[in-house]
Image: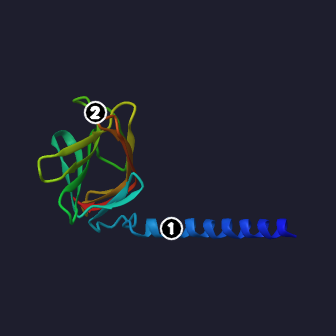
Amino acid sequence: MMKHIKLLLLLASLSCLSLHCKKEEKDYFSILPPATQSGKETAGCIVNGQVWVGSMNWLDWLPNGRFLLQLEKRVNYGGTSHISISLYDTVKQAGVYEISDNTLYSSIGWFGWDDWNGWYTRYRTVNNYKGYLIVSRLDTQQRIISGLFYFDAIEANTSDVVHVTDGRFDMHY
């Protein structure tokens, strides 16, 4: 009889834990801006398991049609974190673009942290740490670009890796 009670308590505990995990996952993604395609000027992602929503975001078309997405988040206790995706490929239509190497003629993903006291940590994609930018809408009439992104990047001095996942952006250009 005691064995059955312990088993029931264990199962009840696991059920509660399972429900709690599902609730956290739902709340976790509800903080991110939705993945829209209407030029809402939003951007966000998950950085090493933490929600990261850009507060100042912009894009730029570089010479020869190259694409640059800049996201910035300032924090209350001082400092700024940045996400930057620079595509060497010419972006002329919706599609999938690889973010990988760190050579002069490649597409690069960056994640950086600046504490405003001169300390800056920069992570960047390289051949073994890469990702993708998926442009889901490129509307040249309304000048809207929207999509998703994810990448892994490494800090050269420490070999620490940052995981940028579930990224989304919806902006005018």
> What is the three-letter code of the residue carrying label 2?
Ala
> x%, y% of residue 25?
51, 65
Residue 66 is at least partly visible in this image: no
Residue depicted at 29% across the width and 45% down the height: 91
Which residue is denoted by mark 2 in the rendering? 156
Task: Name the residue nearer the viewer: 123 or 157.
Answer: 157
Marks 2 and 1 close (CB-CB < 8 Å): no
Task: Name the residue nearer the viewer: 139 or 173.
Answer: 173
Considering only vertical position in the picture, is 123 above or below 20? above
Q: Looking at the rendering, in which quadrant would you find the C terminus?
A: bottom left
Which residue is denoted by mark 1 in the rendering? 24
Specify the quadrant of the image occupied by residue 124: top left
SS at circle 2 = loop
Circle 1 Cα neighbour tier, 10 Å, few/some/many (<14 / 14–19 / ≥20): few
> What is the three-letter code of the residue carrying label 1?
Glu
- Badge 2 or badge 1: first in the primary sequence: 1
Considering only vertical position in the picture, is 136 above or below 160? below
> x%, y% of residue 37?
36, 64
> x%, y% of residue 167?
37, 55
Circle 2 Cα neighbour tier, 10 Å, few/some/many (<14 / 14–19 / ≥20): few
